[in-house]
């Protein structure tokens, strides 16, 4: 399976630590995990750090136990991917993902990325369709868990009444962050630990 030992230069390790909310140990573990996700022929340290050369397909990232059960796993990978097709992650993409979901990340950073993950159409606002998808992912789409159309409409209306400060029918980032700031449990539940 190739070498899965995580060898990063001290300079690079320090740079990643400065640029993320991760400790050196967390970065080394992330690197080891990333290399293990690469195809065997690509499992060398130099290639794993070159975004253009080694990228892990999102399907492989989604196999991680930390993401497997997350109802937003595909959106998480999409938001953090810098690939043109949003179908793979470089090591730095992977580090960014882990950094945002770490306990050390600030509430503003966490809420910014949560907003992007929940913005299914990537238009910069959470509209009724985004909110519907959000609710369906949280409750499930099985017949016994799915909300009826009237329950869904009422819930979306309640969310908008609570969150849509400018009353334009959508929730922008600022409005989302305002709501999240009143929810102390949000930052503790918005995490992924390898």
Image: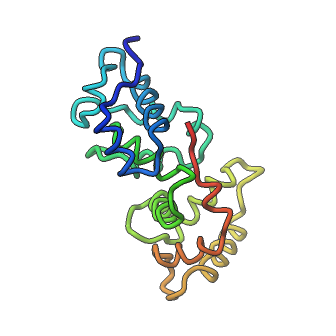
- Residue occupying image coordinates x 71% and y 60%: 147
- Residue occupying image coordinates x 46% and y 73%: 173
Report the front residue among 49 and 132.
49
Give the side of residue 88 with respect to residue 162, left or right. left
Res. 192 image quadrant: top right
Quadrant, the N terminus: top left
Seen from this angle, which residue lies furthest bottom? 166
Q: Position of residue 97 (x, y in %)?
A: 44, 47
Seen from this angle, which residue lies furthest left? 52
Res. 124 image quadrant: bottom left
> Is residue 82 visible in the rendered structure shown here?
yes
Res. 89 image quadrant: top left
Give the side of residue 79 with respect to residue 131, left or right. left
- Residue occupying image coordinates x 40% and y 41%: 94
Give the side of residue 6 with respect to residue 171, left or right. left
Seen from this angle, which residue lies furthest top? 1
Seen from this angle, which residue lies furthest front? 10
Q: Is residue 60 above or below residue 128?
A: above
> Is residue 87 visible in the rendered structure shown here?
no
Report the front residue among 104 and 165.
104
Q: Is residue 162 above or below residue 45?
A: below
Quadrant, the C terminus: top right
Q: Position of residue 48 (x, y in %)?
A: 30, 29
Number of disc labels: 0
- Residue occupying image coordinates x 46% and y 28%: 33
Q: Position of residue 104 (x, y in %)?
A: 53, 54
Give the side of residue 159 with respect to residue 22, left or right. right
């Amino acid at each position: 399976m190739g070498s899965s030992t995580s060898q990063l230069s001290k300079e690079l390790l320090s740079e990643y630590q400065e640029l993320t909310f991760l400790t050196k140990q967390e970065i080394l573990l992330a690197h080891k995990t990333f290399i293990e996700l690469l195809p065997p022929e690509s499992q060398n340290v130099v290639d794993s750090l070159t975004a253009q050369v080694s990228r892990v397909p999102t399907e492989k990232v989604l196999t991680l136990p930390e993401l497997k059960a997350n109802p937003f796993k595909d959106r998480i990978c999409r938001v953090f991917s810098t690939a043109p097709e949003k179908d793979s992650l470089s090591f730095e993409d992977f580090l960014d993902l882990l950094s945002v979901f770490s306990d050390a990340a600030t509430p503003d950073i966490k809420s910014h990325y949560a907003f992007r993950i929940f913005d299914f159409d990537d238009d910069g606002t959470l509209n009724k369709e985004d909110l519907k998808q959000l609710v369906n992912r949280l409750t499930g789409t099985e017949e016994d868990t799915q909300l009826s159309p009237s329950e869904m409409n009422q819930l979306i209306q309640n969310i908008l009444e609570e969150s849509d400060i400018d009353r334009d029918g959508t929730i922008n980032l600022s409005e989302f962050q305002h709501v999240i700031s009143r929810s102390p449990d949000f930052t503790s539940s918005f995490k992924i630990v390898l």
